[in-house]
Image: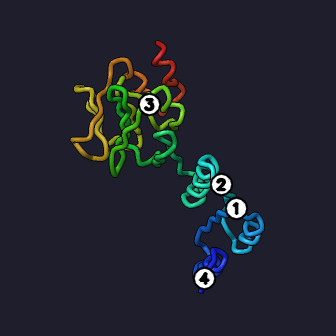
């Protein structure tokens, strides 16, 4: 017996009412029927990458709630959670995102990445952007920031960025934008 997507959706709904179901079909009438099974979305064929990414963004927001934000890399092929990022490092023409679980490399620049990031990310050096929420120790004598209670996870503090970094750490003052520092 051949099982259709609609049959499968019906079986899934009988087992679990909270599973996310996304239909894709070239036949509009099936898409309309699909909503009967409380589907999350319907993607008409041919599926475009923009439409798929939009659906995935909404799905991720729905699963993790509005507090979770993401950064897109590699022309949107990779999506990483902002709160998982420890620090971001400029390495020649590449930018490396060091996260709780692994590193992600992309060809980009701080200028392109900074506007995507929330205020908890502060540029502390010409080659480093640090997630303030991951900082566990700061050694001002040696101009080093340590992350996640790990002495091997550290970023340098550049003289150009030291005052702004201290203001953020002491007063939580994020009003001095990175552009002000970069254009000084």
Cα gap from disc 4 to disc 2, whole angstroms = 24 Å
Q: Quadrant of residue 90?
A: top left
The residue labelled by disc 4 is 2
The residue shown at (22%, 26%) is 142
Instruction: Pick the residue in front: 103 or 26.
Output: 26
Taking 134 as reference, is 91 above or below it?
above
Distance of mark 1 from mark 3, alpha carbons?
Answer: 37 Å
- Estimate how packed mark 3 is, as few (under 14), some (14 to 19) or many (20 or more) residues with alpha carbons within 10 Å: some
Q: Mark 1 or mark 4: which comes first in sequence?
A: 4
In the rendered structure, find residue 184 and report the number of the disc placed on it. Answer: none
Q: Are marks 1 and 3 in contact (CB under 8 Å)?
A: no
Colour logic? rainbow
Q: Which residue is mark 3?
A: 108
* Badge 4 element: loop
> What residue does disc 2 label?
46
Measured Cα–Cα span from mark 1 to mark 4: 19 Å
- Compared to residue 169, the image places residue 30 above or below, namely below
- Mark pair 2, 3: CA separation: 30 Å
Question: What residue sits right under mark 1 in the picture?
Answer: 26
95 or 174: nearer the viewer: 95
Looking at the image, tell me whether mark 4 or mark 3 is earlier in sequence order.
4
């Amino acid at each position: 017996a051949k099982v259709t997507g609609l049959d499968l959706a019906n079986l899934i709904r009988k087992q679990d009412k909270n599973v996310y179901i996304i239909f894709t079909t070239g036949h509009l009438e099936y898409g309309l029927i699909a909503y009967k099974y409380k589907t999350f979305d319907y993607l008409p064929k041919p599926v475009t990458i923009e439409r798929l990414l939009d659906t995935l963004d909404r799905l991720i927001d729905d699963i993790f709630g509005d507090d979770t934000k993401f950064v897109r890399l590699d022309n949107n092929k990779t999506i990483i959670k902002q709160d998982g990022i420890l620090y971001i490092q400029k390495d020649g023409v590449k930018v490396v995102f060091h996260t709780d679980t692994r590193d992600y490399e992309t060809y980009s620049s701080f200028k392109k990445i900074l506007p995507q990031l929330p205020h908890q990310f502060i540029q502390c050096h010409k080659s480093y952007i640090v997630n303030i929420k991951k900082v566990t120790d700061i050694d001002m004598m040696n101009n080093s920031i340590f992350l996640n209670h790990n002495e091997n996870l550290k970023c340098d503090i550049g003289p150009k960025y030291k005052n702004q970094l201290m203001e953020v750490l002491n007063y939580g003052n994020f009003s001095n934008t990175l552009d002000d520092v970069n254009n000084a």
